[in-house]
Amino acid sequence: MNVFLVHGTFGKPFENWFPWLERELDKEGIGCIIPSFPTPQHQTYPDCERLMDYYCDMGIVNNETVLIGHSCGSIFLVHYLLVHGINVKGLICVSGYNNFVSGNNLMDGLNSSFYINKQDINITKSAKEVLAFYGDDDPNIPQNYLEEFASAIGGQAICVKNAGHFNASAGYLQFDDVLNTIKQFNAK
């Protein structure tokens, strides 16, 4: 089993709880890859898709991979799995959303190509295990978008009190729930 994490808009692989998770998984003997996806330049679904294709073609993302998406990285992964029909061991979405228009032209322009404009985005045919974590006080994404996304992708939705957007500004430099979930997937 291995883990592949996709950050969100303006995200980096070395921020928030991502480096901590990589270190903890290394202690467990679980490989973790956190690539730098293009943002803000070239942050489009087709450009990110090409990068993801590379990891799939190399065999790094396969049916024993747990995918983790943070923020806009969540809808990117759902979109990718639905388009490509690949199977993975699990999908964990953190602060994921779809079709949210904030009114901020820059953010809306960067995120819009990832959105899926169809009703059925249930991903349980592609991922054996599906979980969606979201905070009850996210300052960036309205609660109804987080709840709708968590429900729409199937699997288990987990609302965490006072988690914000699960980033450093919300105090998330480590994320025990995600680590424990991965350990559970590994035991299956």
Image (spheres, rainbow, N blue to C red):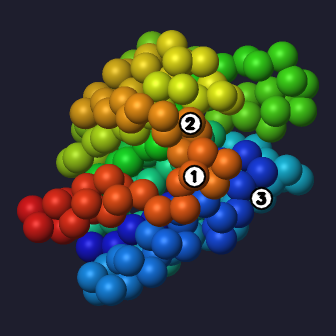
Residue 106 visible within the image: yes
Residue 32 place in picture, x, y as percent: 44, 75
Q: Which amino acid does label 1 sit on?
A: Gly
Tell me what residue is drawn at x 44 percent, y 43 percent.
93
Q: Which residue lies furthest to the left in this view?
A: 188
Image height of 71 relative to 185, above or below: above
Q: How many labels does the image show?
A: 3
Which of these two is toward me, 98 or 181? 181
Quadrant position of residue 29: bottom left
Numbered badge on residue 38:
3
Evaluate if marks 1 and 2 touch, with contact meaning CB atoms under 8 Å apart: yes
Q: Which amino acid does label 3 sit on?
A: Pro
Horizontal side, residue 121 vs residue 79: left or right = left
How many other residues sit within 10 Å of disc 2, few (<14), some (14-19) or many (≥20)? Answer: many
Tell me what residue is drawn at x 49 percent, y 39 percent.
163
Q: What residue type is labelled 2?
A: Gly
Which of these two is toward me, 86 or 25? 25
How many other residues sit within 10 Å of disc 1, few (<14), some (14-19) or many (≥20)? Answer: some
Residue 7 place in picture, x, y as percent: 62, 55
Residue 15 place in picture, x, y as percent: 66, 64
Label 2 and label 3: CA atoms lie apart by: 24 Å
Quadrant where the C terminus lies? bottom left
Q: Which comes sooner in the sequence, label 2 or label 3?
A: 3
Q: Name the residue under label 1.
A: 171
Q: Which comes sooner in the sequence, label 1 or label 2?
A: 2
Image height of 14 relative to 69, above or below: below
Q: Name the residue under label 2.
A: 164
Image height of 27 relative to 115, above or below: below
Quadrant position of residue 106: top right
